Image: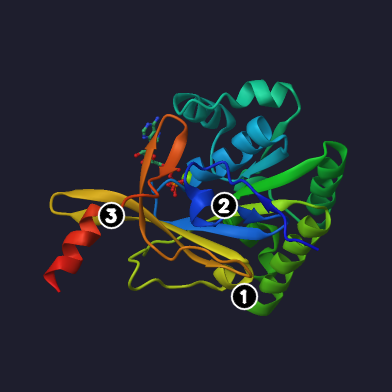
Amino acid sequence: MAIEYIKTGVEGLDKILKGGLRKNSAIVVTGAPGTGKTIMALQFIYNGAKDYGENGIYITTEEDMDDLQNYAQNLGMDLMSLEKQKKIFFIQKPISTLRGGIMSMKGLLDAIRKYNVKRVALDSTIFFEYLYPKYNSHVMEYRRHILMFMGQLKKAGVTFLAVSEKSLTDLDNLRYDMVDFVFEGFIVLTRVRKGSYFERVMTVAKMRGQEHSLDIYPINIGKGGVKVLVDQTPFSLVEKQDKI
Ligand SMILES: Nc1ncnc2c1ncn2[C@@H]1O[C@H](COP(=O)(O)OP(=O)(O)OP(=O)(O)O)[C@@H](O)[C@H]1O
Ligand SMILES: [Mg+2]
């Protein structure tokens, strides 16, 4: 059977992925604070529902819902109107209310079926640490639970995008965490210094089972969200290379 691809909803990214994300795959977007992870996850859900007819659920452990709506509004994404049309749904799980994995998973799967959901975004993977607190000290058990969570989403016909936090995102010295390995795709957002300013860049570090570009691309954040400038080499990196 031919592999099906879905559009990410992030301008320029589908070109780098040579078509988009594999349907029903699970990918993680990682980066330091303020690099555009939340915005990219919002685009995946918002544009997925608006432009590609794929309903979505956005799970946030981080942001207050009103703040998130206003934040998206400033980027030109009207979350409320799609929410009213029952095309996108928000689950806010403040860390203090996360308890016991099984009930929450069942609730999520019920909602996926009921509302014909095709995309789930999770901001961020801290969620797992609270959902399975008993297992944090048992890495293999914790990993097994994340894999189970991802497996159930896959079985439900969902493409899954998770956000994870990294304090160090120097592209030459990336430190991988256990969670990074369980995902099929891995996108890194970071900043590269250019003299007295930082340039935003991204790269696709892995995308299991599909061909993709390994280049580092500059990105912009503005109206519409994150935009990958596919036809440009980052200015900061060109300069570095010239010195060699
Ligand atoms: N309306 C806007 N116009 C232009 N740039 C914006 C706008 N809103 C946010 N940004 C930029 O996007 C950056 C934050 O993006 P985002 O919230 O996705 O980061 P993040 O990677 O999720 O960070 P954290 O790990 O702290 O949650 C801000 O630091 C700001 O520079
Ligand atoms: Mg964020």
Amino acid found under the numbered disc labelled 1: Ser
Q: Position of residue 131 (x, y in %)?
A: 69, 58
Residue 210 circle label: none
Going from the N terminus, do you reach mark 1 or mark 2 first? 2
Query: Is the CB of the residue bearing disc 1 within 8 angstroms of ligand 1?
Result: no
Query: Distance between the Cα atoms at labels 3 and 2?
Result: 28 Å
**Quarter of image, res 126:** bottom right
For the residue labelled by badge 1, is the local secondary structure a helix, a strand or a loop? loop
**In the image, what residue type sits under mark 3?**
Pro
The residue pinned by badge 2 equals 124
10 Å neighbourhood of mark 2: few (<14), some, or many (≥20)? many
Can you identify the residue that label 3 sits on?
234
**Can the viewer see residue 192 in this picture?**
yes
Residue 230, compared with residue 209, is above or below; it is: above
Left or right of 67, for residue 183: right
2, 136: nearer the viewer: 2
Tell me if I can see residue 138 in this picture. no
Q: Does the residue labelled 2 lie within 8 Å of ligand 2?
A: yes
Mark 1: few, some, or many residues within 10 Å (few <14, many ≥20)? few
- Secondary structure, mark 2, is loop
Of the residues tagged 1 and 2, which is closer to the observer?
2
In front of the other: 35 or 18: 18
Q: Upstream in the sequence, badge 3 or badge 2?
A: 2
Mark 3 burial class by Cα count in 10 Å: few <14, some 14-19, many 20+: many
Residue under label 1: 137
Q: Are marks 3 and 2 in contact (CB under 8 Å)?
A: no
- Name the quadrant containing residue 46: top right
3 or 77: nearer the viewer: 3
Q: Which amino acid does label 2 sit on?
A: Ser
Image x and y of residue 229, in percent: 37, 46
